Amino acid sequence: MLRVLRIPAEKLSDKAIASARERVANLKELLGRQPDTATIRQYFVEAFESEFSVEFREGDLTLSEHKRYQAALAEIDTVDWVHLVARPRADMPILEAARKFPGGLLRAAVTYDAVARLIRQVWFTGDIFVSPRRTVADLEAALRDLPLDRLEQRTLAFFASRPADLLGLAPADFVTVVRIAIGEPLLARNP
């Protein structure tokens, strides 16, 4: 699972790994059985046809499609292309912080692009109780690929847009622990 999510396991604590495992589902778990590949493919075909108002049919590429395919392949089938977006791990380490709040110990693991000042991904764990349960996972999704200067605004807007019982935590606590993780504690709120 961590390999698929491109998370180096050695960078996360056991609790963070367990928390990530809790938040990921697969079709076998959801359906109670492993669906066959042909069925999954058929559902994707139907969904794309419906969404884009097109009709798919099996067949060979047309000459025009084959020409475009060859041109695209010449561009992307190289080592340079594969490594074009790769960055050294040192450019985007996973930074972690934990802080005790009245609602419990809140931890943040953050993949942060310091050059672009961009939060790539954040995971919250800890001894906290938030209801509904999916609130934390939804917040993590809302903060993905977010410019750092919009962290507080996005977090406050997120909690203002939905009912959530934070049981002793405040929306600003999530902002604080992220800022501490990325090394900007002076901007973090003091409890």
Image (cartoon, rainbow, N blue to C red):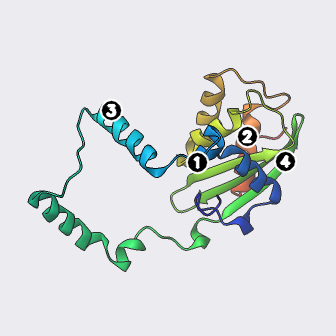
Where disc 3 sits, the SS reads helix
- Identify the residue shown where x is 18% and y is 68%: 71
Residue sitting nearer the eye, 66 or 182: 66
Query: On residue 34, which mark appears?
Result: 1
Q: In whole angstroms, how far apart are the C-alphas of marks 2 and 3? A: 37 Å
Instruction: Determine which quarter of the picture holds residue 32.
Output: top right
* Residue at the top extreme of this rendering: 163
Disc 2: which residue: 174
Instruction: Determine which quarter of the picture holds residue 184.
Output: bottom right
Front of the two marks 1 and 2? 1
Where disc 1 sits, the SS reads loop
* Residue 72 x %, y %: 23, 65
* Residue 86 x %, y %: 48, 70
Q: In whole angstroms, how far apart are the C-alphas of marks 1 and 4? A: 41 Å
Callout 2: few (<14), some (14-19), or many (20+) C-alpha neighbours within 10 Å?
Answer: many
Where disc 2 sits, the SS reads helix
Tell me which numbered mark, 3 or 1, is placed earlier along the sequence: 1
Query: On residue 51, which mark appears?
Result: 3
- Identify the residue shown where x is 82% and y is 41%: 190
Amino acid type at image mark 1:
Gln
Tell me which numbered mark, 4 or 3, is placed earlier along the sequence: 3
Please indicate, yes or no, whether residue 108 appears anywhere in the rendered image.
yes
Where disc 4 sits, the SS reads strand
Amino acid type at image mark 4:
Arg
| In the image: residue 153, left or right of residue 163 | left
- On screen, residue 104 above or below 87: above
Callout 4: few (<14), some (14-19), or many (20+) C-alpha neighbours within 10 Å?
Answer: some
Front of the two marks 2 and 3? 3
